[in-house]
Image (tube, rainbow, N blue to C red):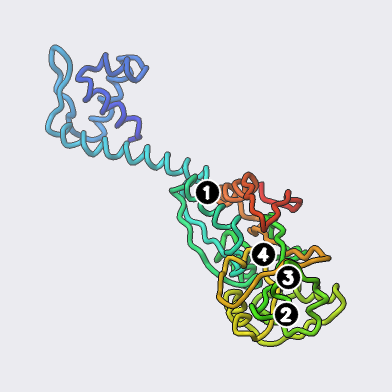
Amino acid sequence: MELRHFRYFLAVAQEGNVTRAAEKLGIGQPPLSQQILALEREMGVQLFRRTGHGVTLTESGQALFADAKRLLDDADNAVLNAQRAGRGETGHIHLGFTASSAFNPAVPALIRAFRNAYPGVGLSLVEGNTAQLLNFLEEGRLDLAFLRPGLHAFNGISLYRISDERMKIVLPLKHALAKRKSVALSALANESFVLIPRAASPTLHDEIVSACRAAGFEPKLGQQAPQLSSVVSLVSAEFGISIVPASVSQIRAEGVVYVDISGASVRTRLALAARENDDSAKTANFFNMAKQMRVERSDTSIEENEDKTPE
């Protein structure tokens, strides 16, 4: 017994006439009659009562009608669901992000656009530092992650550059440099820096330290903060100064100012990461949308990607 037998049965039942059902199905009337007889023999019941004008359903046929229709609807839905999954229109994405990446306008814009374009795909968000997110990707606990890889490449991981974002200096409001529009990094040589611990955010930490070294000094590491919002709060409390991605200036804490860095282009790289062997259509859709989107913000610079990305 095959699904086509139920399609034949339903066509005859709905038309009430074998000839008309055959025309609807695009087959000959004799083969259709033979298929109906074969179905009745296999089931061991009479499904149709033959009349001079066509056929009507017997009690057995009436009992089969609703179940056969539901069975065929389920089969059609199964095919449709498989096709939608193959196009990446259903399923679930586990998406990681670093605390600093969440402030970049490209990230919420991309998530919002993806949800609007693929409402059938669920999204779960997981926050972590770059090292944690890379481990989660390798373990299969995440499908994608927004992270700050610096200039590093990682085995088995594909990276797509979302933006190269300017960095800013965050100062206490009463600091001697707070009224300047821009400050050279070398002017911070004697300052105490409030930074996220390297273990929590190795890339961002190293980028800040490297920028200071390029300006000719080793930063004095003072109070540590678990995340960027805490960095800003501690600067407000005058524990020191810091350097943060420009998008963090959205945190409008009292008692701080954000100042441009003069004399040097200090940037931090934001990328979208996935496993190289991930052949999921929904992941590919997210990557493709990231490629298509160009978020224009005064505090970010979106550049063309030159990294290896999944097909």
**Left or right: 176, with 250 as reference point:** right
Q: Which residue is mark 2?
A: 176
Query: CA gap, disc 2 to disc 3?
Result: 9 Å
For marks 4 and 2, give the CA distance: 21 Å
Q: Earlier in the sequence, mark 1 or mark 2?
A: 1
Total count of labels: 4
Pointers 2 and 3 in contact (C-beta within 8 Å): no
Task: Please give the name of the residue rendered at 27% of the width and 30% of the height, measured from the top-left corner.
Answer: 39
- In which image quadrant can residue 24 be found? top left
Q: Nearer the viewer, residue 32 or 15?
A: 15
Q: Residue 21 location, x and y as percent?
A: 28, 19
What amino acid is found at the position of numbered circle 4 in the picture? Ala
Q: Under tag 1, what secondary structure?
A: helix
Query: Label 3 sits on what residue type?
Result: Arg
Q: Which residue is mark 4?
A: 246
Q: Which residue is depicted at the point 24% across and 23% down?
A: 12
Q: Dot 1 corresponds to which residue?
A: 113
Left or right of residue 55, residue 24 in this image: right
Label 3 belongs to which residue?
180
SS at mark 4 in the image: helix
Of marks 1 and 2, the one in the foreground: 2
Q: Amino acid at mark 2?
A: Ala
Q: Which mark is residue 50?
A: none
Mark nearest the camera among 1 and 3 is 3
